[in-house]
Amino acid sequence: MMGSASLLRLLQLASPSLPIGAYTYSQGLEAAIEAGTVGDEHSARIWITEALGVVADFEAPILWRLLKAFSARDAAAVSYWTECFVASRDTVEFRAETIQMGYSLGKLVADLRIADDTLLDILSAQSEVPLPTAFACAAEALAVPHGVAVLGMLFSMVENQVLVCVKSVPLGQVSGQRLLLSLHPPIEAAANHAQQLEDDDLCNWAPGLSLLSMQHEVQYSRIYRS
């Protein structure tokens, strides 16, 4: 059972108010809104649920492995999974997004002095720090249980997507909260799924999302960086 201290640390780590710039990204959703794929609460739920499925098949399982690697102080495993994740970002925007937020969160970990020297050495040894690597390091430094750390990352991602919908579809505040509540079961399912996958089962196949991201790079009117 997670204690109150760990819960508070998780809430801080997963908060959209944490200054790592998550609110400036839509993770392809702005392009989907522009294309008319997302235009109301129902279509927003379909989009976010499918996005969760992609994350549950790749990003979340890699976070799970990074959490285990940082816990074991296994520098080689951290480097391996970090490189795998960076290599999987198949558009300029998606790559820039994870590197920028990873850098910001990693800097926070160092500036707040929450991690021991071994964790900091492993983190600083990475040539590039994507968000899952920085998140895993921070979670381990804050003694957040691994399972709930995965839940926290997934909830943070979903909450940010809902905020994009509230601001840009636009959806009302009540609609946004209803949407977020309805996504709790898919978040739990995604977290459980991510922890069960074998290495050979990981997959980030999402060609439609990749195409939308590339279209967003040249989209005329936009307010998000991805």
Image (cartoon, rainbow, N blue to C red):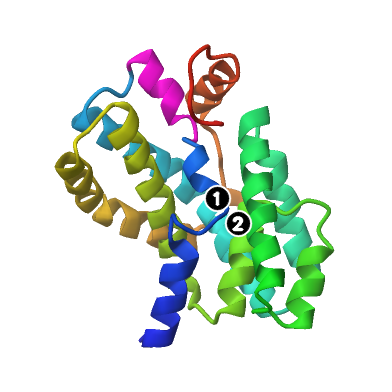
Q: Residues within 10 Å of mark 1 (few under 14, many from 20)?
A: many
Task: Please name whichever residue, 168 or 135, is drawn nearer the observer in this view of the structure.
Answer: 168
Q: Which mark is residue 136?
A: none
Where on the picture, by quarter, is residue 189? bottom left
Q: In the image, residue 214 lies at what x, y percent?
A: 59, 20
Q: Is residue 100 above or below residue 136?
A: above
Task: Please name whichever residue, 68 or 138, is drawn nearer the observer in this view of the structure.
Answer: 138
Q: Secondary structure at mark 2?
A: helix
CA separation, marks 2 and 1?
7 Å
**Residue at point 56% right, 39% down?**
204
Considering the image in quadrants, where does the C terminus appear? top right
Q: Which mark is residue 59?
A: 1
What is the magenta range? 27-36
Q: Is residue 43 above or below residue 115?
A: above
Residue wearing tag 2: 132
Mark 2 touches mark 1? (CB < 8 Å): yes
